[in-house]
């Protein structure tokens, strides 16, 4: 039973570029949440998707957008990259309407040069 | 975004010692979670708490959901080298699905 999988594991981009990160949720999970974890900090909530729509959003600019596919997998897109976007991007999955906790993937380490 | 106040920031302990860390918030949460994160990996769930006053154990780990619903603590008994890592508390508010995370406690166990 595969857990949450994310790709790629590492990525290097330059300022102004765009990036797409991918996430496959744990089997049986239908809800995907994305978090940004800066070095030395706890994860911060970006947004959550279920039924292919963004349902909840944290305090992140519109440069951060996402998508969820019919198979529940999800993408996080970041446009016009800034140096401050360098972070570990974590995907977490859960079951909508359930009180069960979110399970996290190992993240994508994004470095902006 | 809001982050919970977690203390201590770091701990250096001898193998075999007990560890205690806590997390406080200005907001009420209906769920408290404790995660451990190793370098290069995502957070791994240790314990989930769903009711004020709840005390839950997972092996050598014990966590409690504070009765005010604004705090939680995690205890680790008889620490071992593999307990090394960063421990995060996380809270979830009623009606919301996102988690608010603490700032983390970095634990070092000296053999």
Image: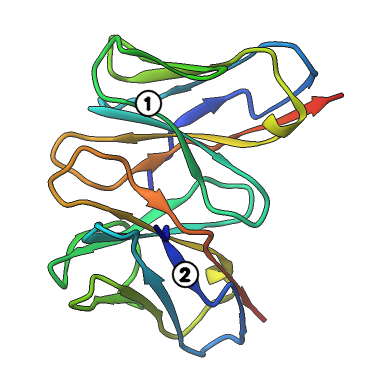
To which residue does mark 2 refer? Answer: A6
Same subunit under labels 1 and 2?
A: no
Residue at figure coordinates x 37%, y 41% from the top left: B100
Is A73 rendered above or below residue B35? below
- Estimate how packed mark 1 is, as few (under 14), some (14 to 19) or many (20 or more) residues with alpha carbons within 10 Å: some
Residue A3: where, in percent of width, then height? 42, 57
Is B95 rendered above or below residue B59? below
The disc at residue B25 is: 1
Residue at figure coordinates x 58%, y 72% from the top left: A9
Q: Quadrant of residue B30?
A: top left
Is B54 rendered above or below residue B103? above
Chain of the residue under the numbered disc 2 shown in the image: A
Query: Which type of secondary structure does the marked residue at label 2 adopt?
Result: strand
Residue at figure coordinates x 13%, y 40% from the top left: B95
Residue A47: where, in percent of width, then height? 29, 61
Residue nearer the viewer, B90 or A84? B90
What is the spatial separation of the Cα atoms under label 1 and label 2, in whole angstroms?
A: 31 Å
Residue B20: where, in percent of width, then height? 59, 15
């Amino acid at each position: 039973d595969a857990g949450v999988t994310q790709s790629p594991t590492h990525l290097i981009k330059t300022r102004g570029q765009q990036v797409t990160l991918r996430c496959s949720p744990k089997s049986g999970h239908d809800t995907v949440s994305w978090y940004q974890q800066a070095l030395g900090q706890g994860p911060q909530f970006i947004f959550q998707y279920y039924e292919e729509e963004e349902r909840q959003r944290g305090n992140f600019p519109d440069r951060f957008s996402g998508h969820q596919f019919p198979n529940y997998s999800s993408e996080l897109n970041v446009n016009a990259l800034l140096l401050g976007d360098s972070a570990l991007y974590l995907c977490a999955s859960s079951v909508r309407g359930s009180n069960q906790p979110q399970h996290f993937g190992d993240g994508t380490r994004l470095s902006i040069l | 975004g809001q982050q919970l106040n977690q203390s201590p920031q770091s701990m250096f302990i001898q193998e075999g010692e007990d560890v205690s860390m806590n997390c406080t918030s200005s907001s009420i949460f209906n769920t408290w979670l404790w995660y451990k994160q190793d370098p290069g990996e995502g957070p791994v769930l240790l314990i989930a708490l769903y009711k004020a006053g709840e005390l839950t154990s997972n092996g050598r780990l014990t966590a409690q959901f504070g009765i005010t619903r604004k705090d939680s603590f995690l205890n680790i008994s008889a620490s071992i080298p593999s307990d090394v890592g960063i421990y995060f508390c996380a809270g979830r508010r009623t009606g919301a699905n996102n988690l608010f995370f603490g700032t983390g406690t970095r634990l070092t166990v000296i053999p």
